[in-house]
C-alpha cells in the first residue's frame, strides 16, 4: 500500500493576516505572467438551484512555474443563505494534494490583488486619485491592493447607504496613508479620478461612461452574470477592454455581452487578456489619454497563486493541521 499523503488544512482565521496586500499582488502578478505565457486556466462552471435558491460553482488553473494547481469550489445561498469556500491546492508535478484552505478570509485579498495587478499594468504611472463605488469587503480588498501599486493622494468612496460609505471611509482613512472620504454621489466620486473601481452588487450600470476623463483606468469586478452589469456600454466602447480570461467573456461578462448585443461593439473589441499584458505578449496602455478597462470575474489564476503563497508562509510559521489523504491506488485497487 502507498502511504497517505500528508496534506495541510488551513483555517480562514489562520490565513486572515498571514500576508500583506503587496505580497498578494506580487504572487498574483506572477500567476498572470504564467497565464500570459500559456499556463492553463478555465472559467467558472456554475450550477444554479431554484429551490432552495443558490448556486454551486468553481474554477481551476495550473501554474507550472509556481509548481501548484487547484482552484475554488464554493456554494452560495441555499438554505443557510451564506457562502463557503473550499480551496484545494495540488502539487503541479506529482499531482498530490498539498493543502486544503478555507478560502473565506482570503477571498477579497486575492480578488483585490488581481485588480491591483491590472492597475499596475494598465493605469497611468502618475495615477493618484481613486474613485471607489462600493463599500463592502470586496471594495476593501480592491482599495488595499490599489494602494500597494500606486501612491494615492485621495480616495472618494460612494455607496448607496450613507452609513456604510462613511464607516468604510473612516476605517480605510485610518489604515492608509492617504485621504479616504465618503461622497454623496457617484458623480462626485468619479469627477477627476484617475482610477475608478466598481465593487458592487448592482445589476445595472452605476455610472455614465461619459463621465470618465481621458486617461482613466476602470476596474469592474462586482458582477459575473450575463444579465447584470456595473458599467454601461459607453464605458466599454470608450475603453481598451482587458478581461481576466477571454474564455469567460461569452459566459458571464455581462457588460461586454450586453454592449455587443446592443451593437455598440463587435467581437474584436477585446484587446488582450490581463496575463498577456503582464507577460508582455500584448501592449497595455499606449497613451496618457487612453481609457483602460479591466473586467474581473474571478479566476483560478489569482486563487492558485495566492493560495500557494499562503501555503508557503503557513509552513514557515508552523500553522495548520495535517490531514491524511489516501491515494486512489489504495482506495480503488486494480485487483
Image: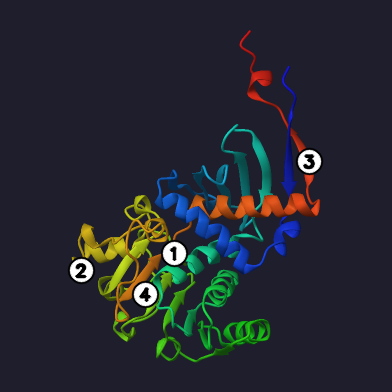
For this view, does 5 lie left or right of residue 280?
right
For this view, does 26 lie left or right of residue 272?
right
Picture disc at residue 264 = 2
For label 4, the residue is 205
Mark in front: 3 vs 2: 3
Quote the CA–CA distance across marks 4 and 2: 15 Å
Q: Secondary structure at mark 4?
A: loop
* N-term-proximal mark, 3 vs 1: 1
Q: Are marks 4 and 2 in contact (CB under 8 Å)?
A: no
Q: Position of residue 213 (x, y in %)?
A: 33, 85
Q: Position of residue 57 (x, y in %)?
A: 51, 48
Quote the CA–CA distance across marks 1 and 4: 11 Å
Q: Quadrant of residue 168?
A: bottom right
For label 3, the residue is 322
For this view, does 151 lie left or right of residue 225?
right
For label 1, the residue is 223
Q: Nearer the viewer, residue 81 or 69?
A: 69
At 81% across and 51% down in the image, what residue appears? 318
Q: Are marks 3 and 1 in contact (CB under 8 Å)?
A: no
Q: Are marks 3 and 2 in contact (CB under 8 Å)?
A: no
Quote the CA–CA distance across marks 3 and 1: 36 Å
Amino acid at each position: 500500500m502507498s502511504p497517505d499523503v500528508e496534506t495541510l488544512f488551513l483555517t480562514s482565521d489562520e490565513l486572515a493576516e498571514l500576508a500583506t496586500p503587496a505580497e498578494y499582488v506580487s504572487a498574483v502578478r506572477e500567476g498572470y505572467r504564467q497565464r500570459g505565457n500559456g499556463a492553463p486556466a478555465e472559467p467558472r462552471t456554475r450550477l444554479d438551484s431554484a429551490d432552495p435558491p443558490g448556486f454551486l460553482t468553481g474554477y481551476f488553473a495550473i501554474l507550472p512555474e509556481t509548481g501548484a494547481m487547484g482552484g475554488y469550489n464554493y456554494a452560495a445561498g441555499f438554505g443557510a443563505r451564506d457562502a463557503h469556500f473550499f480551496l484545494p491546492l495540488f502539487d503541479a508535478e506529482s499531482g498530490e494534494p498539498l493543502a486544503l484552505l478555507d478560502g473565506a478570509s482570503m477571498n477579497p485579498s486575492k480578488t483585490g490583488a488581481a485588480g491591483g495587478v491590472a492597475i499596475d499594468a494598465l493605469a497611468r504611472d502618475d495615477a493618484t486619485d481613486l474613485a471607489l463605488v462600493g463599500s463592502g469587503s470586496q471594495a476593501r480588498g480592491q482599495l488595499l491592493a490599489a494602494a500597494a501599486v500606486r501612491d494615492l493622494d485621495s480616495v472618494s468612496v460612494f455607496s448607496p447607504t450613507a452609513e456604510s460609505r462613511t464607516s468604510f471611509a473612516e476605517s480605510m482613512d485610518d489604515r492608509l496613508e492617504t485621504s479616504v472620504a465618503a461622497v454623496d454621489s457617484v458623480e462626485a466620486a468619479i469627477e477627476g479620478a484617475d482610477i475608478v473601481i466598481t465593487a458592487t452588487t448592482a445589476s445595472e450600470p452605476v455610472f455614465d461612461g461619459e463621465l470618465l476623463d481621458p486617461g482613466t483606468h476602470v476596474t469592474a469586478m462586482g458582477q459575473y452574470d450575463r444579465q447584470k452589469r456595473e458599467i454601461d456600454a459607453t464605458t466599454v466602447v470608450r475603453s481598451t477592454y482587458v478581461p481576466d480570461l477571454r474564455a469567460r467573456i461569452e459566459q458571464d461578462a455581462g457588460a461586454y455581452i450586453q454592449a455587443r448585443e446592443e451593437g455598440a461593439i463587435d467581437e474584436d473589441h477585446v484587446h488582450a487578456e490581463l496575463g498577456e499584458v503582464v507577460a508582455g505578449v500584448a501592449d497595455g496602455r499606449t497613451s496618457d489619454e487612453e481609457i483602460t478597462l479591466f473586467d474581473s470575474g474571478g479566476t483560478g489564476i489569482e486563487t492558485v497563486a495566492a493560495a500557494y503563497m499562503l501555503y508557503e508562509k503557513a509552513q514557515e510559521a508552523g500553522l495548520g493541521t495535517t490531514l491524511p489523504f489516501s491515494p486512489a491506488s489504495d482506495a480503488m485497487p486494480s485487483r
